[in-house]
Image: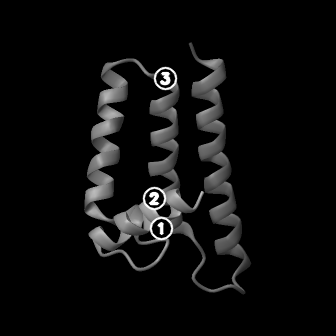
Amino acid sequence: MQTMANFFEAINKLLGVTGPGELIFHPVFIGLCVALFIYAILRRKKFLTLALGGLMGSAVIFHYFYPRDSSNLTELITFIAAMGILALLVVYFAFVRE
């Protein structure tokens, strides 16, 4: 397990990422996710496509809807609702729609 931690720390150091939330919004990481997403669509890898779409969707929701003020209940409810809708979409595409 320590080897994996060292591997990810080396990647973060290479990209210049200091915090855990910065990697998701790094242009290299976003480009890699989009390239893998397109590859998964073209090769018809349904669950890889759903995983990458869920990751990218979560990043967008986290970036735009995460409450900045911890005492604002409306922002928290909006964030939870957006994450719930994303989860329902992923479950729908994974198990209901063929």
Pinpoint residue 25: horizontal percent, then vertical percent.
37, 65
Left or right of residue 4, residue 33 in this image = left
Write down the residue under mark 2.
60
The quarter of the image holding the C terminus is top right
Compared with 85, 24 (above or below) is below
Pinpoint residue 77: horizontal percent, then vertical percent.
71, 66
Residue type highlighted by circle 3: Lys
Compared with 98, 80 (above or below) is below
Q: Quadrant of residue 49?
A: top left
Write down the residue under mark 1.
64
Q: Residue at x 51, y 59 (%)?
A: 3
3 or 1: tag closer to the N-terminus: 3
Tell me the number on the disc at residue 15. none
Please state which of residues 48 and 60 is positioned toward the viewer in this rendering.
Answer: 48
Pinpoint residue 78: horizontal percent, then vertical percent.
64, 64
Please state which of residues 98 and 20 is positioned toward the viewer in this rendering.
Answer: 20
Compared with 23, 49 (above or below) is above
Pinpoint residue 92: horizontal percent, then vertical percent.
63, 28
Q: Verify CB contact (< 8 Å) between mark 1 and mark 2.
A: yes
Tell me the number on the disc at residue 46. 3
Dot 1: few (<14), some (14–19), or many (≥20) neighbours within 10 Å? few
Q: Residue at x 36, y 25 (%)?
A: 41
Q: Verify CB contact (< 8 Å) between mark 3 and mark 1.
A: no
Q: Secondary structure at mark 1?
A: helix
Q: Residue at x 52, y 27 (%)?
A: 47
Residue type highlighted by circle 2: Val
Please state which of residues 82 and 43 is positioned toward the viewer in this rendering.
Answer: 43
Left or right of residue 10, residue 68 in this image = right
